[in-house]
Amino acid sequence: MTFDPCAACEELLQPFLDREITPEERRIAEAHLGDCGYCRKRYRFEEHLRRYVRQAVDEPMPVELKERLLALRIPL
Amino acid sequence: MSEADARRIAEGARDRVRFEEEVLELADQVYRVARRLVNTREEADDLVQETYVRAFRSWRTYTPGTNLRAWLFRILTNLNIDRGRREQRGPDFAPLEEGDYFLYNRLEEDGGADDEERVVERLSQDAIVQALSSLPHNFRDAVVLVDIGDFSYQEAAQILDVPVGTVMSRLHRGRRLLKQDLAETVTEGAE
């Protein structure tokens, strides 16, 4: 099997964006991303996607619930 | 009561009040995560309230100086599992054909080249909420804790009481399933 640098870069995508990557892996990914527009595009997309998902599913806490939580404190 | 006893009681009360304040400061984060661990707003409300009841009651089991967020979210996830959802847990090995570039490739195929920011906007908010809530629970826990709760792999492992490698595999598989699901909504929409 021949080595496919884009497939290797794809494997590093998740840990890279999670900042849970070894310095060596980061170096490999960055070197490849510097040369490869195909992978760069997909990394950027993933970054946008994560932000977009967070916003899409965000729902602020109801004010009444916050009040109920305050009332749960054990009185002195 | 001796003066020393009175002082000890006063100090205990002060510690407890400080603890309660710190835990309450995390309420927005707790709700944000809880809301995505369950399917309805009512369930999220109940889960958050139960979490705070339990946290306030067991404040002495928290060791000051350790990770309060992880301690609190562990109560949350344990309560959620106790709410009778254990039997519905999905398998650890869902079939996955595609890699991480799959969704982008599909969107690009479907709608032509756009910049990455615009491409993402082709996904609807409803589709995302729906896709997240249809993930098997053990994948969903990992995805919600890391992607919505901003926990590290290590913290998520501590909260879920599983090895870090398990968190990583559930997280990666969960994200891929999510993307597969979203890709299907794009394809359906195009038909």
Image (cartoon, rainbow, N blue to C red):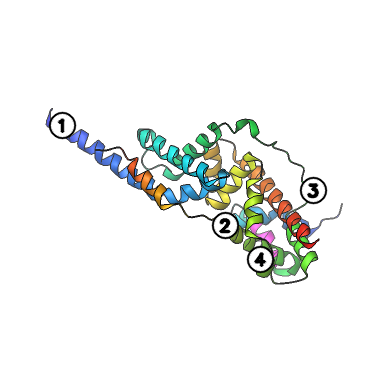
Q: Which residues are magenta?
A: A25-33
Query: Is residue B152 in the magenta section?
Result: no
- Per the model, the C-alpha gap separating discs 1 and 4 is 64 Å
- Residue B125 location (% of width, % of height): 62, 59
* Chain holding disc 1: B
Relative depth, front residue between B89 and B95:
B89
**Image spot of residue A5 (x, y percent):** 78, 59
Q: Which mark is residue A12?
A: none
Using the image, tell me which numbered label, if any, was put on residue B4: 1
- The answer as to whether the residues below labels 2 and 3 share one chain is no
At label 3, which amino acid type do we have?
Glu
Query: What is the spatial separation of the Cα atoms under label 2 and label 1, in whole angstroms?
Result: 51 Å
Q: Secondary structure at mark 2?
A: helix
The chief SS type of the magenta part is helix
Residue under label 4:
B121
> Quarter holding the N terminus of chain B?
top left
Q: Eyeballing the image, is B131 above or below B137? A: below
Most extreme residue toward the right is A1
Residue A3, by quadrant, is: bottom right
Q: Nearer the viewer, mark 4 or mark 3?
A: 4
